[in-house]
Amino acid sequence: MSIWDRLGDFIARVSSSASSGVADVVEAVRTVFSGDPDLRRRVAFSVAMIALSAKMAKADGIVTQDEVRAFQEIFEVPPSETRNVARLYDIAKQDVAGFETYAHRMAQLCGSGHANCMMLEDILDGLFHIAKADGLIHEREGQFLHRIAEIFRIDEAHYEAILSRHVNLGAADPYVVLGIERGKPFEEIRKRYRKLISDNHPDRLIARGLPQEFIKIATTRVAAINAAYEMIERGLRHA
């Protein structure tokens, strides 16, 4: 049985509850998949992305076709399961609980409990991918994403590094992309670069519970990291 079959069963169960709010969704993930931690991680990531995408759409007020396509780039949902995914999206969008409540609960569900948790960074990266799909990140989307980062305990420097990966690198500071201070010895820069590449290796992403489609999206993250490192290396070589 695929993750989408299991997710479909889960969403149908949540949808039949009396309130179907964020508490129901989180508790259902914990209990339904308690016997399979790996599957629970993958389902938790998917639920967090769907729910917070819905809350971002509500905060922004519109959902463009570009954003729908960007969402589909992260999740290749079988036709038989699109209705269930739409149902979970609607549950989150219509829930009276605000996006901050959702973000706190999703952080508890998916996060490690430590600052700058990689799984929560993956969720934030996915939200950025959707937000920028129509060509720019709107002001409300920017405010939403920044507040999500605060709730996820992603510090400001780390947030700036994530943000910089989603803008034209020509206008971005390569040191910010790598999350390292300008003026550091080149050995430290290289060490930081290698850690970022290692953290974003496909095997690491799969182990964190990300769907296969997201790993394709994450190649843009690696491309930005590589380009930033090459820019720094080239600049130092000619200094």
Image (tube, rainbow, N blue to C red):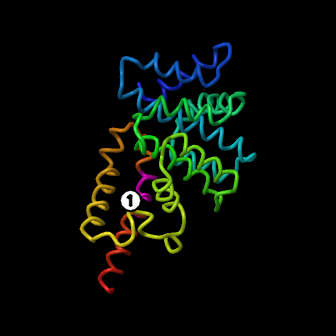
Which residue position holds label 1? 222
Q: Is residue 225 above or below residue 68?
A: below
Instruction: Report the magenta stretch's main SS.
Output: helix
Can residue 19 be spotted in the picture?
Answer: yes
Seen at 27% across and 71% down, the residue is 186
Front one among 171 and 84: 171
Whole-percent x and y of residue 157? 47, 56
Q: Is residue 219 above or below residue 111?
A: below
Q: In this figure, what is the number of numbered marks? A: 1
Front one among 215 and 159: 159
User: Which residue extends farthest left?
Assistant: 187
User: Which residue extends farthest bottom?
Assistant: 238
Please name the amino acid that badge 1 sits on.
Answer: Val
Crowd class of label 1 (few under 14; some 14 to 19; many from 20; radius 10 Å):
some
Seen at 32% across and 50% down, the residue is 199
Image quarter hosting the N terminus? top left
Q: Secondary structure at mark 1?
A: helix
The magenta region covers 216-223
